[in-house]
Image: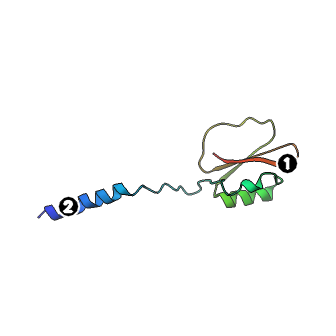
């Protein structure tokens, strides 16, 4: 009586093991599609656009000659700019 149930459970485990789990976190940052914004002006409006396009929850502006923590946050977008308020680097973390 238990054999069909056990076979069914084992079959389900085998199927689940073959499919990699999806690990998309809500708010996870992806900066790959916004690299064309490097060279644009760093403004509140551009920051809002970058947040929307990357899916990040947190925006960290990095002014010139500023040290930042190296802790990684999957939901954070980091935008570095120069003395002329021109975006130099856009990355996640």
Helix, strand or loop status at disc 2 = helix
Residue pushed farthest left?
1
Of residues 62 and 30, the one nearer the viewer is: 30
Specify whether 89 is left or right of 16.
right
Of residues 77 and 10, the one nearer the viewer is: 10
x then y, percent, for residue 91: 68, 47
In which quarter of the view is residue 73 placed? top right
Say which residue label 2 marks: 7
Q: CA distance from mark 1 to mark 2?
A: 64 Å
| Labels 1, 2: front one | 2
- Local packing at callout 2 (Cα closer than 10 Å; few below 14, some 14-19, many 20+) is few
Residue at image coords 87%, 42%: 83
Say which residue label 1 marks: 85
Of residues 90 and 59, the one nearer the viewer is: 90
x then y, percent, for residue 52: 68, 61
x then y, percent, for residue 47: 75, 55
Residue at image coords 80%, 35%: 65
- Indicate which disc, 1 or 2, sits on the residue closer to the N terminus: 2
Answer above or below: position of 92 versus 33: above
Specify whether 53 is left or right of 42.
left
Residue at image coords 74%, 59%: 48
Helix, strand or loop status at disc 1 = loop
Answer above or below: position of 28 versus 82: below
Check if mark 1's residue and mark 2's residue have beta carbons within 8 Å.
no
In which quarter of the view is residue 9 placed? bottom left
x then y, percent, for residue 13: 29, 57
């Amino acid at each position: 009586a238990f054999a069909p149930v056990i076979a069914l459970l084992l079959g389900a485990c085998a199927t689940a093991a073959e499919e990699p789990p999806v690990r998309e976190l809500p708010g996870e940052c992806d900066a790959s599609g916004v690299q064309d914004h490097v060279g644009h002006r760093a403004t509140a409006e551009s920051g809002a656009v970058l947040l929307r396009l990357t899916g990040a929850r947190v925006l960290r502006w990095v002014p010139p000659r500023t040290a930042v923590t190296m802790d990684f946050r999957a939901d954070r977008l980091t935008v570095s700019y120069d003395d002329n308020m021109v975006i130099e680097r856009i990355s996640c973390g």
